[in-house]
Image: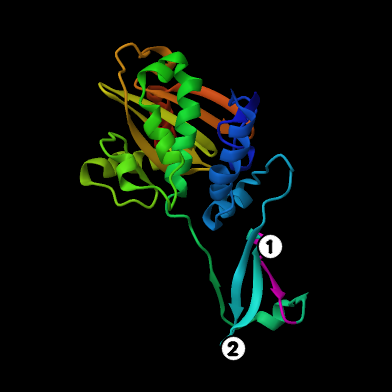
Amino acid sequence: MNSEHIIPLSLGGSNQFCIPVEKNFNAKVGSKVDGVLANDFLTLMRRHEFDARGHSNTTPTVLLKKSHLGDEKRPIQVTLRGKEGILVWDAMTKRHLEPREIGGTTISSQFNIDAHGRKRFVAKVALSAGYFIYGELFRTHVQHNELRALMNFSSESKREDFENFGLRGYDEFSPAEKADKEQNELLSLFCQLIKGSCVIAGLGPSNIVISVGILGKWIGSLNIPAVTDSFPLEGEHDLGHVVALCDGKMATLSYRQLAKDVHEILERKRG
């Protein structure tokens, strides 16, 4: 058995937020799910901002390999360095260009975002975080087979593989139904003000909703069928449970306490 980071260090995780998993599962999921999200352009921007490093302790680099300079579409690679500006590598001359050489010219870049990467990552986190928060209750009372199916979704998956599923959800790119839009906006605010990564779990009469934030950004929520009669509702579980990860440290609190803390922050900002 290996100790698996529920949210990897490269995405703002903590050594305190782990569960034991089989070694083969660890490697497979790490490459297929965690890696897809950790290395996409939008996430890399946040990793650079938060200096979120993985086990290698390498500084996150935002590199746009498919870039071109000027009207002649000269092939270049662009490194985004925040306040330090950009660094441009000329593929033809094999050197970094001076600022005067790129001033006044147009730079165009292309990048790809996995259409299902965020939902798959939220499903993976929900499987582990649900057990971390609720223990055996999660294992025996939740339809985690539906989470596994989503986590393993690929271009080879068939529609019938998901027939009769009750699993529903959104990611940060999904158009929300009117009834859910306000809740998604609230979750986005919570994740932003936590200033790190987080998992927010809430209970319904026949479901669990697990939401995931990565480095200050809500990336998605899943509504999972469950039998919740015996789940805890008091103390740190009042209205739901929150795991907040900031600077490598973990804190747990109730949803009610998080809402109260956010309200106080907003009141202070209003003066």
Residue that mark 2 sits on: 72
| Residue under the image location 28 percent in, 48 percent down | 176
Residue that mark 1 sits on: 84
Q: Are marks 2 and 1 in contact (CB under 8 Å)?
A: no
Distance from label 2 to label 1 (Cα)? 27 Å
Residue 206, how many percent across, how many down? 26, 23
Residue type at mark 2 is: Glu
Stretch of the chain drawn in magenta = 83-92
Q: Residue furthest left?
A: 179
Residue type at mark 1 is: Glu
Quadrant, the C terminus: top left
| Residue under the image location 41 percent in, 13 percent down | 235
- Looking at the image, which is closer to me, 76 or 243? 76
Residue 157, how many percent across, how many down? 40, 47
Tag 1 secondary structure: helix
Q: Is residue 113 above or below residue 212?
A: below
- Looking at the image, which is closer to me, 145 or 255? 145
Q: Is residue 84 magenta?
A: yes
